[in-house]
Image (spheres, rainbow, N blue to C red):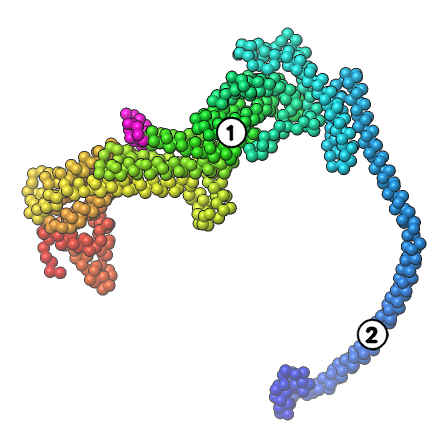
């Protein structure tokens, strides 16, 4: 066993290798161990190991006999695959030779066959060409037969089908076929259009179309004639037949287009029957408003603009009641009234395009034309429901040379208006001064007139077709605001010596009003849209920083921010000047009060009734008079800022120059508190509920000065202890808590200690 143990110890030294002695020693240790009696089972153990050895030998023999067979089978399969591949390669070579030989033999046949195929394809094209010609001739014959039998509806339908075939053939390179089809369509279109137009105009004449006479005649025309059912039936039939010619008419008739510089939006041609209905009106328009007629004058654009509006209004009911149902029944999406208006507006656009170059440099005529056009546009959109997607007069006014002239004239007249409004005698007087409810802002007439001018300019350009043009007008408005601000600043500087005067206050009210209105406009949908357009323009040009772009995009800023900031700065400067002026007066009036003998005044118990210090009367009277004066002259929001700024200055002045500069006995402290709480604070009680909150220094100083002796001594002890022994006695109440308990929040601990030392009645505690 000892030898086994030794061998085990030696075996354990080589655990990282498959060492047989190590496994043997492990096996012996496991089966025998230190039990010598277990050696009796040694025979069984040997038999068991022999059996295991035999099984392992059988497995080794089996494996060693099977592996060569598998290798042999794999080699045989590889040999068979090699033979098959060789056979396939031989067959492929043979087949390739056969194909090459066949192709050589078939080459002449292929060449002959290509020629035959080309001939067949050419014959097929000829046949298709002839079929198209035959088809067109059949349709042409059909139209002729329909017309001979007076079957106009079928003829119109056939012509519409022929026009559709013409459209399908547009991509073909057969120019002669295209010309044949087009000429055939044109031939029958002219015949049908002339016939239907003649019949349609006859029916319209029976209805006394167009309605251009006086209202009585129009009413008579709109009334149903004796043969009304037949007339309206014929109207519907002819209208529908003319609608069928719409496709061929668009093919053959090139619509009149204005030059591209006007950037008119694309719009479909006017439907044929409404074109025919418009013919007499177009003739009248050209007769009266072109050439050398007395009605064609440059200084009277309102004549033709009003005439077109009258025509639209006179025919609206007939178009809605009689024509629109026909269009709806025919399945058309056209609105009769809008189609009629669109055609007449095109006459206006042609007239404007011809007239504007003639009056472009005559300011009076050009400005009058723009005014009349804008009035026309307003009525056209608001009364007659014209669509913004249609061509309009604003497209003509947006043409570069015309638009720049419009901007120049607009600025010129706006500056003239500003000159007149500022030089007016009533420039600084509010027109609502006698109406309290309306005159809350106390707006001078010049400021209200100026903002009305800006509002009118906005109304004039808000219907411009492009955002870029609107932004140019917005830039003009900003220039005008800045110019007006500079003018107000110049007038203000002239009034600086009288900063409490009526005109100075009126200027301040004007500045505040303009800033307030611009801030309101910034939230208007129209200006928000312009802000978005400005953001896109700036983003494309990289003219601003990413921060500014972010502010614009998040709506944190507005298009008027720069102007509003300048106005707010001017407002603050003017208010500061007024506050400083009043404060100087208050300081002058407070000189005697400042020298009051606070140390020797009688106590409250020695006086029957407390009364205001005589030396305080000039100061309080000055405050009262100026507050009343400016309350009447400034608007509520400005006056609120004014009195709060003044209260802050007075609070600090009395605290620093009067309270902290004197010593007080009990009577002096009581008198100070009476003067402040019963006289100074009530002056401001008209403007807020708790005026003492705006005089915190004074209020809290009075609290400290009027503490009874015991409380004052205790407070002084707490403050001294807090400053000296705070780290040693954390359980002692803090100075802040003690001051807050007395109602002192504003004053610092050191200031309170100084105030306590200003009390003459407070005995020395020896600390």
Q: Residue at x 15, y 50 (%)?
A: 660
Asked if residue 448 shows in the view, the reply is no
When asked about the image quadrant of residue 250, the answer is top right
Which quarter of the rendered picture does the N terminus lie within?
A: bottom right
Question: Residue 357: which disc?
Answer: 1
**Residue at 28% over, 27% down:** 425
In the rendered view, does 38 fall on the left or right side of 364? right
Q: Residues within 10 Å of mark 2 (few under 14, many from 20)?
A: few
Residue at numbered disc 2: 71
Question: Where does residue 587 sit, x and y in percent of width and height?
Answer: 16, 43
SS for dot 2: helix
User: Along the horizontal axis of the image, is 610 left or right of 209?
Assistant: left
Extent of the magenta region:
422-445
Q: Looking at the image, can residue 551 be seen?
A: yes
Give the secondary structure at mark 1: helix
Nearer to us: label 2 or label 1: 1
Badge 1: residue crowd in 10 Å (few <14, some 14–19, many ≥20): few
In the picture, which quadrant includes the C terminus?
bottom left
Q: Position of residue 367 (x, y in %)?
A: 45, 27
Give the residue at the far front of this rendering. 292
Q: What residue is at 80 percent from the left and 77 percent from the top?
A: 63
Looking at the picture, tell me which residue is in the foreground, 582 or 184.
184
Magenta stretch: includes residue 312: no
Magenta stretch holds residue 428? yes
């Amino acid at each position: 066993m000892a030898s086994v143990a030794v061998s085990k110890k030696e075996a354990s030294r080589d655990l990282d290798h498959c060492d047989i002695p190590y496994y043997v020693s492990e096996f012996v240790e496991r089966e025998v161990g230190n039990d010598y009696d277990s050696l009796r089972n040694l025979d069984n153990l040997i038999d068991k190991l022999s059996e295991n050895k035999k099984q392992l030998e059988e497995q080794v023999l089996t494996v060693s006999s099977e592996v060569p067979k598998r290798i042999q089978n794999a080699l045989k399969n590889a040999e068979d695959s090699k033979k098959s591949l060789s056979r396939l390669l031989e067959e492929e070579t043979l087949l390739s030779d056969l194909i090459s030989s066949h192709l050589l033999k078939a080459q002449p046949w292929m060449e002959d066959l290509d020629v035959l195929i080309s001939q067949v394809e050419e014959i097929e094209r000829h046949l298709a060409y002839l079929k198209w010609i035959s088809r067109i001739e059949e349709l042409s014959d059909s139209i002729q037969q329909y017309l001979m039998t007076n079957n106009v509806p079928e003829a119109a339908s056939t012509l519409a089908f022929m026009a559709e075939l013409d459209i399908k053939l547009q991509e073909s390179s057969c120019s002669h076929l295209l010309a044949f089809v087009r000429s055939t369509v044109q031939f029958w279109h002219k015949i049908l259009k002339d016939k239907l137009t003649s019949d349609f105009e006859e029916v319209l004449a029976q209805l006394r179309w167009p309605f251009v006479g006086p209202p009585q005649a129009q009413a008579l025309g709109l009334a149903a004639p004796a043969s009304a059912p037949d007339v309206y039936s014929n109207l519907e039939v002819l209208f529908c037949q003319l609608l069928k010619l719409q496709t061929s008419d668009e093919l053959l008739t090139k619509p009149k287009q204005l030059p591209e510089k006007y950037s008119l939006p694309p719009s479909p041609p006017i439907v044929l029957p409404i074109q025919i209905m418009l013919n007499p009106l177009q003739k009248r328009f050209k007769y009266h408003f072109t050439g050398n007629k007395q009605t064609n004058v440059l200084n009277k654009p309102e004549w033709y603009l009003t005439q077109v509006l009258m025509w639209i209004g006179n025919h609206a009911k007939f178009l809605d009641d009689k024509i629109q149902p026909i269009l709806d029944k025919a399945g058309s999406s056209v609105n009769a009234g809008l189609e009629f208006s669109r055609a007449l507006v095109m006459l206006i656009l042609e007239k404007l395009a011809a007239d504007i170059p003639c009056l472009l440099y005559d300011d009076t005529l050009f400005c009058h034309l723009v005014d009349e056009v804008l009035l026309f546009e307003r009525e056209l959109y608001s009364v007659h429901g014209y669509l913004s997607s249609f061509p309009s007069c604003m497209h003509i006014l947006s043409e570069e040379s015309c638009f720049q002239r419009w901007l120049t004239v607009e600025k010129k007249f706006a500056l003239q208006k500003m000159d007149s409004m500022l030089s007016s005698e009533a420039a600084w007087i509010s027109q609502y001064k006698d109406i309290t409810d309306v005159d809350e802002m106390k707006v001078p007439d010049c400021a209200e007139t100026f903002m009305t001018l800006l509002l009118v300019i906005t109304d004039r350009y808000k219907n411009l077709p492009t955002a870029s043009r609107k932004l140019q007008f917005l830039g003009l408005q900003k220039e005008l605001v800045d110019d007006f601000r500079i003018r107000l600043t110049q007038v203000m500087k002239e009034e600086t010596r009288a900063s409490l005067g009526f005109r100075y206050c009126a200027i301040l009210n004007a500045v505040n009003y303009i800033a307030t209105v611009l801030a309101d406009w910034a939230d208007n949908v129209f200006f928000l849209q312009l802000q978005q357009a400005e953001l896109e323009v700036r983003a494309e040009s990289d003219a601003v920083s990413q921060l500014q772009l972010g502010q614009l995009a998040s709506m944190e800023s507005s298009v008027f921010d720069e102007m509003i900031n300048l106005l707010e700065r001017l407002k603050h400067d003017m208010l500061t000047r007024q506050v400083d002026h009043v404060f100087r007066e208050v300081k002058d009036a407070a000189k005697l009060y400042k020298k009051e003998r606070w140390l020797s005044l009688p106590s409250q118990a020695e006086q029957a009734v407390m009364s205001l210090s005589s030396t305080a009367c000039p100061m309080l009277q000055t405050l009262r008079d100026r507050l009343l004066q400016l309350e009447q002259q400034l608007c509520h929001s400005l006056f609120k800022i004014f009195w709060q700024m003044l209260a802050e200055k007075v609070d600090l002045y009395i605290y620093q120059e009067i309270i902290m500069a004197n010593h007080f006995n009990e009577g002096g402290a009581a008198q100070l508190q009476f003067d402040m709480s019963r006289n100074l604070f009530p002056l401001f009680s008209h403007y807020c509920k708790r005026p003492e909150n705006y005089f915190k220094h004074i209020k809290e100083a009075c609290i400290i000065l009027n503490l009874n002796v015991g409380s004052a001594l205790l407070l002084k002890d707490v403050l001294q202890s807090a400053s000296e022994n705070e780290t040693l006695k954390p359980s002692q109440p803090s100075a802040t808590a003690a001051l807050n308990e007395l109602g002192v929040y504003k004053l610092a601990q050191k200031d309170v200690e100084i105030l306590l030392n200003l009390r003459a009645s407070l005995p020395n505690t020896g600390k």
